[in-house]
Amino acid sequence: MSSLMKYYEAETEDEMLTSNLRNRAAYSLRDNGRYGDFRDWILLLMKRLQNEAKEWFELSCETHER
């Protein structure tokens, strides 16, 4: 998540988790004003990160149960 936060210049994790960046103007300029698409992309990235972390957790539980 820290890499994504750096890339999107988010100051807090909650900005990434809600895709509500405080620095919207920079991204509106970068993405030609398509902030809605940008928000959807961030939410997709966060969902992927959540699924990856869930898989790590489940795999670690399986190894300890054996």
Image (cartoon, rainbow, N blue to C red):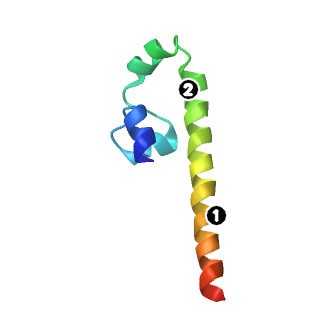
Q: In front here: 59 or 26?
A: 59
Q: Is residue 51 above or below residue 59?
A: above
The residue type indicated by label 2 comes to: Phe
Kind of residue at badge 1: Glu
Q: Secondary structure at mark 1?
A: helix
Q: Residue at x 59, y 85 (%)?
A: 64
Residue 36 in percent (x, y) is at 58, 24
Task: Name which residue lies at 40% across and 46% down.
Answer: 2
Q: Label for residue 38?
A: 2
Direction from residue 9 to residue 30 in the image, left or right: right
Badge 2 marks a residue whose secondary structure is helix
Q: Position of residue 30 (x, y in %)?
A: 46, 15
23 is higher (above) or lower (below) than 50: above
- Location of the C terminus by quadrant is bottom right
Q: Which labelled disc corresponds to residue 55?
A: 1
Mark 2–mark 1 distance (CA, rounded to whole Å) = 26 Å
Instruction: Where is residue 10? Give x, y as percent.
Output: 37, 36
Q: How many marks?
A: 2
For the point 45% across and 20% down, which residue is it? 27
